[in-house]
Amino acid sequence: MSKKTVKDIDVNGKKVLMRVDFNVPMKDGKITDENRIVAALPTIKYVLQNGGKVIAFSHLGKVKEEADKASKSLRPVAKRLAELLGQPVTFIPETRGAELEKAVSELKDGEILMFENTRFEDIDGKKESKNDPELGKYWASLGDVFVNDAFGTAHRAHASNVGIAGHLETAAGFLMEKEIEFIGGVVNNPARPLAAILGGAKVSDKIGVIENLIEKADKILIGGGMMFTFLKAQGKNIGSSLLEEDKVELAKGLLEKAKINGKELILPIDTIVAKEFKNDTEFKTVSVDDIEDGWMGLDIGEKSIALFTEKLKDAKTVVWNGPMGVFEMPNFAKGTIGVCEAIAHLQGATTIIGGGDSAAAAIQLGYADKFTHISTGGGASLEYLEGKVLPGVEAISDK
């Protein structure tokens, strides 16, 4: 990798500013999913064990007004981090000022402190989100080196990633390094054949990804709600299935583009349809040529799962983003489960999940350890797959 990683910098005796992604879901002040905290541990432990002083910080949710602060404090996260690390984490309920500066100056080698939600700085003029130069410079003044391990915000140029990086030597943490290697690798240098499986409700969310991957991938398999816009583009009746009317022409163009580029764009051949959007309702499997009025497709059918499994067999790199059906409803989760199993059982392939719902599905189904890499960034992964330059990655020092 051409970017510096935490192993390329000397952290011994240094104040190491560390941007982590602790944007975890909370309910009533309790963390409901601690995956992101666990994912950050290797980088934090590495710096502490090598004699560095860690000053960790993150955003949590959106903070628009003073009233948001109560439910958006990182204090519960600092408490859980201390338990996971097995050592104290000093929490400073400020984002700047004398208390924070004093705590930083008193930090000893191998110790860690964490300061408050970086987005508390957004209440007065969006200083964090708009990358206020003074704020980035101030935070940079607290440390000697900067480690960015927050891939989830790499597609945003904020004061806490890009702003600080403008003033200090910057390295990628282990999590960021893995994302650059795997998600970046899909776009820049994949082992072939490269197959992309895209699902989810809307074509509009994935247009950029499809357009980029039509050039990069050898096969693109499409499922989920967005398949119906493509089926409509082929002139099929889709009943009352989800449709983005204004994207039908675009879907036609993408089908055409795939053909011209000699790429396989594979659509499902059957679908599970129901009359109502709920789990406990009558449903049946029909061919995509036989969807009747008044029925909506809520999953891909068994023949499509078999087709997708067959098409994936020879793939050397697979990237998957988005469920194949309404995964939250057990009757319409079989397509997502089938595709997840097909990818999980591939031999000798690099298999990557581009974050979001697909990651949740794989974890829920117990297949997480069968994938080469599960991305921690939703929007960041998508923008990377679109071939965009991510400001947070770009700002890391080159080797």
Image: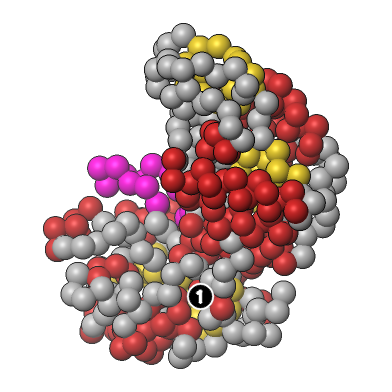
Q: Residue furthest top?
A: 282
In the picture, measured across the screen, residue 235 lies left or right of residue 295, that is right
Is 181 on the left or on the right of 192, as rendered? left
Q: Position of residue 281 (x, y in %)?
A: 43, 11
* Residue 375 visible: no
Quadrant hosting residue 118: bottom left
Q: Position of residue 396 (x, y in %)?
A: 57, 80
Give 203 or 350, whichever is nearer the viewer: 203
Q: Does residue 397 appear to the left or right of 345 in the view shown?
A: left
**Residue segment shown in magenta:** 24-44
Instruction: Kindly identify the residue that appears in the image at 48 percent across and 67 percent down.
Output: 155
Residue 210 placement, left or right of 66: right
What residue does disc 1 label? 391
23 relative to 28, above or below: below
Q: Is residue 355 above or below residue 216?
A: above
Quadrant assignment for the N terminus: bottom right
Residue 227 versus residue 34 in the image, above or below? above
* Residue 105 coordinates in the image, percent (x, y): 36, 86
* Residue 147 percent across, percent down from the top left: 53, 76
Spot the residue most to the left: 67
Q: Is residue 4 magenta?
A: no
| Residue appearing at x 44%, y 53% in the figure | 83
- SS class of the residue under badge 1? helix
Q: Amino acid at mark 1?
A: Pro
Few, some or many C-alpha atoms within 10 Å of disc 1 (few <14, some 14-19, many ≥20)?
some
State the residue at coordinates (76%, 55%).
Answer: 261
**Which quarter of the figure is the C terminus placed in?**
bottom right
Q: Residue at x 39, y 69 (%)?
A: 57
Foreground of the two, 165 or 22: 165
Q: How is the image coloured?
A: secondary structure
> Is residue 284 visible in this depiction of the protein?
yes
